[in-house]
Image (cartoon, rainbow, N blue to C red):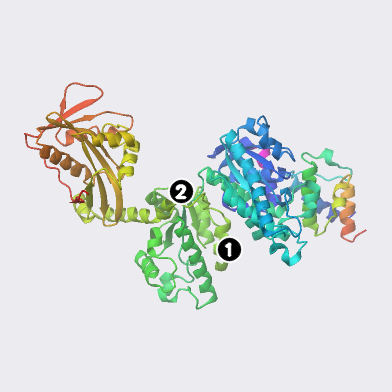
């Protein structure tokens, strides 16, 4: 997976969660990050949309089980494999 | 982060700010003057996003809020159940936040205009009933939102034009809400805000489905900012005065270099038109009671001359409550302006196109709000307007008169500064007074003074209106009041005297005066009137009394100053007597006295 992509997504996480030292791992889930509740999740997804210029469908937003899945979805929408 | 620009941040940055605030609230509170307020948020939608952003915005405005949020879908229950948590919370403010989806009644297709109207009224009454129910149960300030226009139009273009259209119906409900709402409730005009932002961008269907909160995150910023400004207004934190720079702010060009004729202002150029529009917006602010001051690096005479003579000035010198033009530091000038207008530095809004001056004021005077003016003058009005600095609850004629009475006081202070000889100053004021009976049309004003004067008040007898009438009706009693004006304007009724006829004496039951007219000669005028009344009755003495209170220390020496002698050893109430058979000391004043003929 593209390092730039991971790094950019990590930056979004750091801003949304106000955690400047956060390090993204593919297995990370909502349980691992302080404050990642369902409302924060929506805020996160909207920030990802804005940062990468992509749109998630309503159904897609709820269905991401972990950071790895999010990364894959973002990658797909950017047209990369 | 400067408090003024916080509403210009993106939602993401504001949410981050809100998070930092939650993580270290005690740290953020240190060194800041904050009002503590309890705020209940009852929403017809999920309110957590609103509350988080509102917290951060309120904090920047000086309000440290503790929130109670009603659970999703519980608005009706929270309001109608007398044992609900919202009542137990004891909120200073209760926010009733709704959106179009909360409307319960919609007109059926093809219903008549009259039926639609009645339905709109019924819907509005229901929402007003929520507000009055809350107010009946607890003492709280309610902020109530109206409804945004629908994002879709099943009737297409006709949706706003046919009475059963949804767009027409929401407008009708909002109109009824405005009519029926109790005047104690602060209205929040969501309809305008959403339209201003653009319904397309303000409502987000995806977010609505995911979170049961209908607004886009981008819209939440102006939404919460407007809410915060309403709460701040109700806390007395609204601003009072816009301080304006001249060159580059009110007109293009540099006055000192170009001269008044070459200033860019008026319909002859696009840029000139932009400045003219900004001045017209400021003119509207003046008309509703916002104060304007000028703070410019210019020669004063030249600056005033430009105001007076330039053909396209929308503002006049009379609109400016305090005009400061010199070459000194602007921070010092702002302090001077605040003192001169008798308002706090935190009531000022600094409007200046120079980023250096703005930076200076932000660092030197953090309580002053600084508008982040955009570079293009065509956008000035909007930038100032968006800041929401001058929210008001209702326009009173008193507020609209504020500029004129303040301008008057300013002029009085200006000429006083130029006089070394106080008597010469008093003469120059051209003071005139009317001595009139305590009767219509000034009776109420006199009664008000009797009830409210604390400082210049010899005996602080709180006669009610009925007592006052009874006193004046009693045989042997009389009274008069004094209305004062000078060449700058009228003060109105400022002194009330009640005299009781006693055996061989006249007793001063009441002698009070407004502190605004201290040492202008009214004290002497009143003394002369009292003596004249005693002589008219042919009584040999005037009796008086000083009843000390916590507030009237300033008149402890009033009677001795006019030659009254202390009688007896009374404490703390001191009795006095003025013997009219001995020479009475003259009491000079420079007031021309008129006595309107008694009807």
Q: Please tell me whether mark 2 sits on a helix, a strand or a loop.
A: helix
* Residue at mark 1 to residue at mark 2: CA–CA distance: 24 Å
Residue sitting at the far right: A81
Find residue B98 and report its horizontal and vertical position in percent.
68, 47
Q: Quadrant of residue B415?
A: bottom left
Q: Is residue B542 left or right of residue A47?
A: left
Q: Which residue has dot 1 on it? A: B374
Find residue B452 and report its horizontal and vertical position in percent.
35, 37
Vertical order, B296 against A16 (above or below): below
Determine if residue A8 is in view: yes
Residue B417 among magenta residues: no
The one nearer the camera, B15 or B119, is: B119
Find residue B74 and report its horizontal and vertical position in percent.
72, 38
Determine if residue B420 is in view: no
Q: Please tell me whether mark 1 sits on a helix, a strand or a loop.
A: loop
Q: Which mark is residue B345?
A: 2
Residue B21 among magenta residues: yes
**What range is drawn magenta here?**
B19-24
Task: Work out whether disc 1 and disc 2 sit on a shared chain.
Answer: yes
């Amino acid at each position: 997976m593209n390092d730039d992509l991971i790094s950019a997504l990590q930056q979004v996480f750091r801003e949304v969660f106000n955690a400047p030292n956060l390090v993204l791992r593919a297995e990370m889930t909502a349980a691992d990050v302080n404050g990642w509740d369902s409302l924060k999740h929506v805020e996160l997804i909207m920030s990802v949309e804005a940062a990468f210029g992509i749109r998630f469908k309503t159904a897609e937003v709820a269905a991401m089980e972990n950071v790895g899945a999010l990364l894959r979805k973002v990658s797909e929408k950017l047209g990369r494999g | 982060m400067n408090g003024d620009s916080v509403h210009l941040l993106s939602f993401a940055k504001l949410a981050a700010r809100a998070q930092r605030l939650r993580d270290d609230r005690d740290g953020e509170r240190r060194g800041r003057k904050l009002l503590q307020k309890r705020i209940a948020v009852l929403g017809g939608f999920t309110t957590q996003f609103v509350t988080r952003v509102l917290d951060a915005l309120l904090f920047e405005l000086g309000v440290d809020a503790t929130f109670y949020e009603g659970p999703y879908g519980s608005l009706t229950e929270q309001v109608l159940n007398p044992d609900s948590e919202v009542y137990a919370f004891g909120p200073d403010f209760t926010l009733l936040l709704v959106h179009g989806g909360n409307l319960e009644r919609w007109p059926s297709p093809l219903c008549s205009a009259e039926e639609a109207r009645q339905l709109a009224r019924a819907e509005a009454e229901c929402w007003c009933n929520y507000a009055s129910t809350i107010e009946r149960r607890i003492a709280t300030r309610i902020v109530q939102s109206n409804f945004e226009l629908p994002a879709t139009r099943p009737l297409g273009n006709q949706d706003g034009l046919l009475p059963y259209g949804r767009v027409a119906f929401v407008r009708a409900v909002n109109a009824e809400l405005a009519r029926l709402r109790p005047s104690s409730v602060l209205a929040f005009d969501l309809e305008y805000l959403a339209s201003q932002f653009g319904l397309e961008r303000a409502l987000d269907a995806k977010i609505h489905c995911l979170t049961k909160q209908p607004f886009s995150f981008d819209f939440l910023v102006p939404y919460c900012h407007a809410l915060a400004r309403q709460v701040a207004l109700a806390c007395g934190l609204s601003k009072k005065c816009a301080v304006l720079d001249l060159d580059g702010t009110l007109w293009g060009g540099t006055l000192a270099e170009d001269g008044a004729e070459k200033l860019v202002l008026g319909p002859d150029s696009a840029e000139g038109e932009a400045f003219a529009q900004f001045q017209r917006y400021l003119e509207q602010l003046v008309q509703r009671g916002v104060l304007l001051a000028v703070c410019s690096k210019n020669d004063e005479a030249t600056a005033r001359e430009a105001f007076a003579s330039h053909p396209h000035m929308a503002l006049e010198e009379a609109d400016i409550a305090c005009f400061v033009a010199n070459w000194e530091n602007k921070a010092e000038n702002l302090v001077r302006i605040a003192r001169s207008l008798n308002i706090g530095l935190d009531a000022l809004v600094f409007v200046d196109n120079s980023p250096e001056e703005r930076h200076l004021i932000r660092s030197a005077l953090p309580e002053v709000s600084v508008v982040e003016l955009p570079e293009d003058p065509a956008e000035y009005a909007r930038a100032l307007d968006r800041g929401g600095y001058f929210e008001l609850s209702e326009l009173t004629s008193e507020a609209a008169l504020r500029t004129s009475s303040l301008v008057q006081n300013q002029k009085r202070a200006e000429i006083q500064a130029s006089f070394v000889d106080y008597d010469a100053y008093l003469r120059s004021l051209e003071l005139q007074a009317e001595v009139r009976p305590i009767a219509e049309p000034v009776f109420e004003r006199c009664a008000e003074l009797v009830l409210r004067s604390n400082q210049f008040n010899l005996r602080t007898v709180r006669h009610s209106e009925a007592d006052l009438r009874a006193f004046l009706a009693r045989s042997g009693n009389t009274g008069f009041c004094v209305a004062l004006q000078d060449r700058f304007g009228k003060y109105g009724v400022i002194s009330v005297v009640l005299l009781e006829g006693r055996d061989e004496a006249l007793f001063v039951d009441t002698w009070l005066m407004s502190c605004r007219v201290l040492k202008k000669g009214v004290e002497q005028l009143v003394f002369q009137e009292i003596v004249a009344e005693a002589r008219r009755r042919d009584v040999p003495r005037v009796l008086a009394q000083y009843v000390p209170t916590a507030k009237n220390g300033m008149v402890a020496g009033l009677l001795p100053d006019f030659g009254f002698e202390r009688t007896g050893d009374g404490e703390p109430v001191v009795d006095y007597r003025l013997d009219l058979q001995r020479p009475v000391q003259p009491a000079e004043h420079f007031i021309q006295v008129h006595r309107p003929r008694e009807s």
